[in-house]
Amino acid sequence: MKFWQTLALALACITGGAAMAADSVHEFQMKSIDGKDVKLADYKGKVLLIVNVASQCGLTPQYTQLQSLHEKYADKGVVVIGVPCNQFGGQEPGTEKDIKQFCSSKYSVTFPMMSKVDVNGAKQDALYAFLKSKSEKTDDISWNFEKFIVGKDGKVAARFAPRVKPDAAEVLAAIEAELKK
């Protein structure tokens, strides 16, 4: 194994270990699509729907349902968070500026969007290591538009496959259940 591969593996272990030691998504910080620090602790008391997104995917039209869900539930305490990722078929190749422009012009997205991250592998974002480790299904993200519902307490409440639409009955039921807690 080459030095850089060993280093990448060590960093992945450290990142994953730190993520597994966390108790809540509220312990994590990300960068917004505009490059600003976003403390997920700012979302304490809210139900989160965290989705890895891509602009050139067959599932990209899910942005429509994500935006509708955001509009319907924002006043009730739900926050949709889009996290661009280019790990699946190179379907999110643009810059943050390109992604933001696409989302706003094509889908009128107003929910929070984060900077592009890796959701699997040696460079996976620590939040995604946590989300996977704390969900019932702990394997890698399978494709764009995999969804995690996080309760008001910052704990993973549900995980849904990419083809499950954001407005599917099971997703809405999970959101409603978390809102009642």
Image: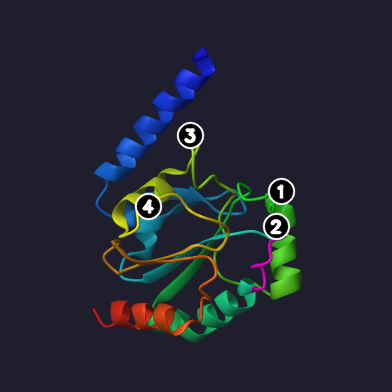
Q: Nearer the viewer, mark 3 or mark 1?
A: 3
Whether label 1 touches label 2, CB < 8 Å: yes
Query: Residue 109's x, y, as percent?
Result: 64, 72
Image quadrant in which you'd find residue 154: bottom left
What kind of element bears circle 4? helix
Circle 1 residue:
95
Whether label 4 touches label 2, CB < 8 Å: no
Q: Earlier in the sequence, mark 4 or mark 1?
A: 1
Which image quarter is the C terminus in? bottom left
Residue type at mark 1: give it: Thr
Query: Pointer 4: residues within 10 angstroms few (<14), some, or many (20+)?
Result: many
Query: Residue 168's x, y, as percent?
Result: 48, 82
Q: Residue at x 48, y 25 (%)?
A: 8
Q: Is residue 101 left or right of residue 117?
A: right
Residue type at mark 4: give it: Lys
* Magenta residue span: 56-61
* Res. 122 mark: 3
Q: Is residue 142 left or right of residue 136?
A: right
Q: CA distance from mark 1 to mark 2?
A: 6 Å
Q: Earlier in the sequence, mark 3 or mark 1?
A: 1
What kind of element bears circle 1? loop
* Res. 6 mark: none
* Res. 99 mark: 2
Circle 4 residue:
132
Q: Nearer the viewer, mark 4 or mark 2?
A: 4
What kind of element bears circle 2? helix
